[in-house]
Image (cartoon, coloured by chain):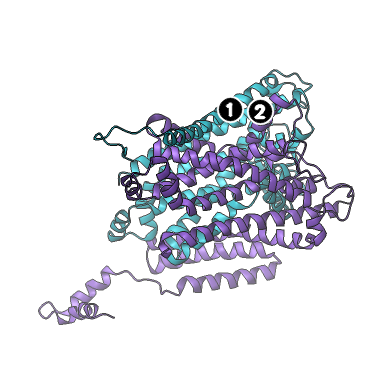
Amino acid sequence: MADSSNELTRPVKRLGDRIFSGTALGAGVLILVTLAGVGLFLTIEGLPGFTADSSATQPADNFVGLAGPLVFGTVLSATLALMLAVPLAVGVALFISHYAPRRLSQGLGYLVDLLAAVPSVVYGLWGIIFLAPKLVPIYRWLENNVGWIPFFSGPTLASGRNMATVAVVLAVMILPIITAICREIFLQTPTLHEEAALALGATRWEMIRMAVFPYGRSGIVSAAMLGLGRALGETLAVTLVLSPAILYSFNFIGAQNPSTIASNIALQFPEASGLEVSVLIATGLVLFLITFVVNFAARAVVNRRSEFSGAN
Amino acid sequence: MTPPTQTLEQRPGADGPRGSGPLNTQDQALHTRTLPRFAPLGLLAVATAVSVGISLALGWNRAAMVVVAAILYLVAINLVSRSVENGRRATDRTVTGLVTIAFLIALLPLTTLLYTVLSNGLGALSGEFFSASMRNIIGEGGGIYHAIWGTLIVTGLATLMSVPIGVFSAIYLVEYGKGALARWITFLVDVMTGIPSIVAGLFAYALFVLFLGPGVRSGFGGAVALSVLMVPVVVRATEEMLKLVPNELREASYALGVPRWRTIVKVVLRTASAGIATGVTLAVARVIGETAPLLVIAGSTDSVNFNPFDGRMATLPVFTFYAYSEPGVPAEFSVERAWGAALVLILIVLVLNLIARLISRAYSPKTGR
């Protein structure tokens, strides 16, 4: 945008222009202030929670005893979800960008985007009513046949409300965002790279491995990290599906599952008072910092890439 | 089909001196044998038939049948292709199968979710469901009247706050912003899209508790929380649209002596208005289903509350959550209401998405407006 006022005439300072640009600047700065405010107000209200005694951090003795398992549960559920979602999302994105008939691909992409529009509370209901009972036979089989692996030692609840079900629901919820970004990145692969690979006699899969994946690698990584950010902060689906506890456990199909920060807040906050509220806000601050770092890193990778690809 | 192809095909025969014989054998060596086009479908049919047979014999359920059919197909296509074609083709065909299966798996949640919500929720919809609140209701009856009003008020206020802030921020970023500040705002807006919704709710609570004392609940607080989630979406959508406005339009306006702010309002924003409307609609669709922040700051109530500045306010997502998680004594009625509310919520979101697509299609330059 070149400045319209040229050197020939003295730039006219119009009142309307100054008010307008001032408002625009103010709105932009307000966003920065809000972001800082989120950190600031959570710190102000949460600070007493960090040093709270056992009366406010039940069932744990102190803040670390409560927040530690919650962070563990949050990271564990999100990581499991990511491990399920990323390979599937890459496959779906490839199908839409390189395998589906071109005329269909836009509609198919829209279909996957619809998954992102479903409210999380509906995912929670679906997870607990439809999905969990369907998964119970698999859990039973795992428990009976490979129960010696600590992950699957059980015992499985008949309701299927455990970490594994949460991971599946979260994976479904983060699938659309990972798919959408991967799809965009795969479609950006220079056609010349693809055609060069095909001209050398590569099969379609070899072309994808030689041209599409190398070009999109950083994009896939950042898409996965954005999905991780979503999964870390997801609340209602976890709250509805998980049978929660405050503990460290790698048993994915057991009756006692580590709760997540967001889910714990949603469960406890409506009845909390006094110092308990501060403790919950303090855990919220921890969640904010974790997701901020993950998103910050992911966006930094995406932005570095977009500057690079802007040159081609 | 076309003449040039024919001449190319006839060429080996027409090549007198070298003769067609040796060239043909060379030709066969160069081209490996390929499976006929119907091979994948045929193998899929065979795999399905075998799987159905095994399942009927051993009494497996349908899910196991489908999984076995898929695995059989992948193994079969790999082996057949490996023996007839070569290893590389076999890998390619296997990956094609895997990618297609991945897509089909991704469709499963969407279809089963829509089916579950429809089959459980349709029974709950009735005149009373939309016209009654939950005041003094125990057991059967009652409805979501109060929750619909709460959702409309909270989302409406959030939209009223986020659209001006978002649009003006985007104007700053595209029309005025240069240097470090604009770059940081762009970057942090992206980061802000990843704020967990419950953190936005806690932020609104922490903000209001400073002024109104502990235990504060209000619809307006919910609107503030939703704005935190909505502003970044509006900014990104508007920014993309403003960037698409050709510079020639701005310069033409400046050349007529129009002040910069009037150029932005009358030319740039007007040109981008359809795109901005699409973006705002999608942003509304995104926040209207948010539960966690409203659970924290707007709370829940059984009565209609039209005043967003005073007291708890029920909203559809929170209503759905509590109707399912705390159903009361005859649980089935409350659970049915939860499904009904979930169905209404999904329908609202789908309709908003549809409206957004229609706006963008109706006004997109490609269809020649």
> What's the mark number on residue A285?
none
**Mark 2 residue crowding within 10 angstroms, few (<14) / some (14–19) / many (20+):** many
Relative height, residue A283 to residue B88 (above, below): above
Residue in the picture at 67% in, 50% down: A123
Label 2, on which residue? Answer: B207
Q: In this orientation, does residue A33 appear?
A: yes
Image point (77%, 20%), residue name: A54
Q: Which of these two is toward me, B244 or B197?
A: B244
Q: Is residue A51 left or right of residue A188?
A: right
- Please name whichever residue, B347 or B278, is drawn nearer the observer in this view of the structure: B278
Q: Position of residue B74 (x, y in %)?
A: 51, 63
Residue placed under numbered mark 1 in the picture: A37
Circle 2: residue type: Leu
Picture residue at 51% right of the left edge, 48% below the top: A178
Identify the image quadrant of the N terminus of chain B: bottom left
Amino acid carrying label 1: it is Gly
Task: Assign a secondary structure to mark 1.
Answer: helix
Letter of the chain in purple: B
Q: Residue at x 41, y 42 (%)?
A: A218
* Horizontal arrangement in the rendering, residue A12 relative to residue B43 (left or right): left
Location of the C terminus of chain B by quadrant is bottom left
Q: Chain of mark 1?
A: A
Q: Are marks 1 and 2 in contact (CB under 8 Å)?
A: yes
Gap between marks 1 and 2 measured at Cα: 9 Å
On the same chain: label 1 and label 2? no
Write down which chain is painted cyan. A
Q: Secondary structure at mark 2?
A: helix
